Each structure stands twice: as C-alpha cells, then as structure tokens.
Amino acid sequence: MSTRRTLIVTPAPTANGDLHLGHLAGPFLAADVHTRYARSRGREVLLGTGFQDTSTFVVTTAHRRGVGPAELVATSAREIAATLAAMGIRVDGYTGDDDRFTKWVVDFLGRVYAAGRLELRTLKFPYSPRSGQFLVDGFAAGGCPECLAEGCAGLCESCGHLVAAGDLLDVRNALDPSDPVTMREARVLVLPVERYRDRLRAHFAANAGGLRPHMAQAMDAMLSRPLPDFPVTYPISWGIQVPFAEVAGQVVNPNAEAMAWSMHATALAAESRGVSVAGEDGLWLAGGGSEIAYFLGFDNIFPFAVAGPAMLMAFDGRYELPARYLTNEFYELDHQKFSTSRGHVVRGRELAARVPRDLIRFYLAATSPEHQRTSFGHDALARITELRLVAPWNRVAERVNRWAGRGPLPVPARSRRAAARMTERFAGSYELCGFSLNRAAEAITDHLARLDARRVTDDAEAGGFCFEVLTLVRAAAPILIDLAAGVLGPDPDDGPDPAAVTSVTPGPLPLLTPAGAGR
C-alpha cells in the first residue's frame, strides 16, 4: 500500500443557491468516485469542499431574490450540504464562513504581505456614481477582452482567463444595466504573477500528464505571454476585511482565497478522519508526502492553477504545488446552460427524492462533461438507465438468485481471468492519471451486456458467472453505491485477488427500480 497521502479538493460553490446537476455532474461526483475507489485500495485520501460566502454573486443573487445576503448564505449552506448527502457524496471537510477560516485567510495573506510579495498598484475599475460603489466581479457585466464572450468580471467562463473589471468590453452595472457607469482608479494590493511565470511553465511542463487537453491548451496560451497582475484586495465592502494600512477598508478578492481555502478544507478533512495535522497548512508542507489534486470546472483554472500556485511559490519552497487538475466543461439542461435566475435548473436533492440515486449517479457519470458540453434530460435519464443499467442488471441478478445459497460453486480459470481484466479496466478509469467517469459508466454497460448474454446451464458455469457478477458489483461500487452496499456492505474494499479465488457461494442480489417507477 502506498504511504503517500492524496488531498482531493473541489472548489467551493458560491453560497447563492443549492447545488444543481451542473455542479454534481462535474467536480463533485468525480471527486467522490475517485475517493471511494482509492480508499477501497487502502490509500489515505482526504476530500474537502464547502461553500463560499464572500463572492459578489451572493450579493447580486440576494438582490434579485429580494433577501438579505446573510439569509441567502445560511439557506444555501444548508442546501448544499443536504444535496451532497442526498447524492451520496461524502465530504470529509466542509468549509464555511466561521471565524477560524476568516482568521486563516488573513494570516496566510498577511505572511505573503510581510514577505514583500504583494505590491500596491493603481488599477481602473468600473464605478457607479449613483451608488458610489466600485463594480468588480459579479457587479460588472460585459464582454471578455480575450475571447469576447459575454459574462462578468473576474473570471471568464468561456476561456478561463482573468478578466480585469476595467478591461470589460461594453461594461455595465450587472444589478442595474440602466445605471451609467464611469471608470475610476483605486489603489489595491496585487500579486505580480508575471514574476512566477517561468516557474509555473516549468512546473506544468513537468506535470503535463496531470491536465486534461482543454486546460493544457489554455495554460499554454496563458503562460506563453506576460501574466496580468492579480488583485488580492478589492475596494468594496462585501468580503473579508484586510488589515493592511495602504488599503484600509478593502476586502480580499474572493478568488485570492483559493490556496488558503484549499488548505483549510483539507485540514478540516484530516480532523474529521482523525488524521493529525499541524496547523491549517500542515498537509501542504513540502516533503510532507501529500499529492494535491483538484476536481474543478474549467472556468476556475486561473485562481487555482495560475494565481494560486504563484502565491505558493511566493513562500520559496515551503509548500507542495498541486500537480493534477481534473477539469470539466459545462453541463447543460436540455442543451441550454443551467440558470438559477431563469428557473432553468434541476437540483440534485429534488431529483434524488424521485429517482434512485444510483441511477442518477450512473447517468451523470455516463454524460459527465469531461471534454465538451453535454446535456441532461429527464426522458434521457429514464431511457438510458433502463436500457443500459436497470433492465440488464435485473435479468443478471435474477439469474444469480436462482443459485443463491448453493455452493460453494467452482470458479473456472476463464472467469478468474475475466474478473482480473474487468478489475484492470475499471482501475484505468478511476486512477487519477486516466480518470474518466464516462469510461467507468461505459465499462458498467459493457460488462452488464456481456453477462446478460451469457448462458448458464450447470454448476461450473454458474460459479464463474456469479463470481464475475460479484466482481462487477465491486468494480462499479464507487458509482453504484447503494447497490454495492446492499451486496457487499458499506465501504467495500477491492476484494481478493481474482487469481486466488477457486469457489464462490452466491448470495441473493437486489433488483434496481426504474427511474420512472416513482419512489
């Protein structure tokens, strides 16, 4: 067993609503599946996420809904945690907005500041004379100066680049498009990311296998030319107040919290699993034996893969650098982007109340937007899960159940070899170096179809058949969590070496309920 620890981080969703299927089909399900698989192999894995309440999108969403930001945060935090639980996504460390986190962000950035790594810059920002407020991130809408896509300031959802509010094309007030917007300068603290560009290029060149193609292409584009200064403070009031005299009254840019938040999330994860850790950053210290992997949306790559690692580099070798980034594209609803404001959304918790969650997890895995946009549809979920999972599984399970309690039955060499190959195929989809929910779901489909077509006429054939079915359940356990728990018990391990199994005593297998059958 490897002694190396893996820290799995999924960036915190904004606390401006519940999680929808777009969140779940991307980073959250993927992180949970890998974590379950790795633990079944006896590895130490810590999974951290949570919610972020400092984003300006909390304010804009609260404004649209006619509620206070604090009320929205409290409701959203409960909903996010409940949805993760309803979907069987087990998070070890769940961050929030408590004093411990706020203190750590200030302390972490304070050490960057004390080391002289932050610099004062005069930047231009959109400004609303009517409200007397600077417009940053979710407060400012317009076109991305890099790819021209419409969006907000901060990060471009289309190309992943940093979008300075002052550089937005045709900028407008996101809360009130009729509000005349002017430009005004403000002094803010920035991290001069360009200083670290050569080191960033060397790091990602050495870890090229840790990136999916779209991110690798975007990183190559970003790092091939001078990087913009990254604002660490903003001249607004919503967020974590900074103690730096030069920018008194300003707050931390929410995207500048990325590394401090990640450390905090993994520290909470360690504590929840009884792992001793020295301080919020103890797991991240260089030489400490941690591998850091992110599961995240493509639009989050700048804070977590450019500015964040540059901030770690500012500590001159104190910290390990993240080396693996499992990105995903947008997951759509009926081929349109999920939109909470337009009511074009399906929330995971609500769907799990109507459809068995194993079916949801299987469908989301099969349609996860790993390399391009994919789409969710209620009819498609029912049709695909019935065709590829429910019907073939139930036929296979009923065949096994005819032999339940009989045995021990012999397992022939052919079935032992098939079980070994099956296990290897799934492992190739679950390991970080080739992780793919799509391929794991495809493997479930392929092996169910193969077993469904198999003829079983005597004890020798039945023993091999039942063993291969049991192997499939074990291999599919990170996705089909309830089926696996019903057959193998909670937290199944990776089982015995198939080559060493000579007999099996089949037990009864549960049947799956179709998506359209109700709950």
Image (tube, rainbow, N blue to C red):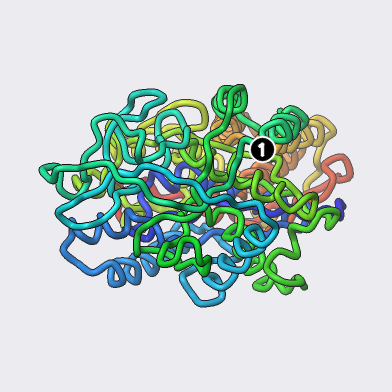
In the displayed structure, would residue 510 be above or below residue 25? below
Q: Position of residue 266 (x, y in %)?
A: 65, 62
Q: How many marks?
A: 1
Q: Quadrant of the C terminus?
A: bottom left
Q: Position of residue 110 (x, y in %)?
A: 61, 64
> Regarding mark 1 in the picture, which secondary structure is present there?
helix
**Residue 476, located in which quarter of the rendered image?**
top right
505 sits to left or right of 230: right
Residue displayed at 33% across by 27% down: 149
In the displayed structure, would residue 159 be above or below residue 270? above
Residue matched to label 1:
195
Badge 1 density bin: few <14, some 14–19, many ≥20, Cα 10 Å: some
Q: Nearer the viewer, residue 504 or 2?
A: 2
Residue displayed at 57% across by 42% down: 399
In the displayed structure, would residue 517 be above or below residue 272? above
In the displayed structure, would residue 338 be above or below residue 219? below
Instruction: Name the residue type under label 1.
Output: Arg
Q: Position of residue 167 (x, y in %)?
A: 36, 33
Question: Does the image show residue 465?
Answer: no
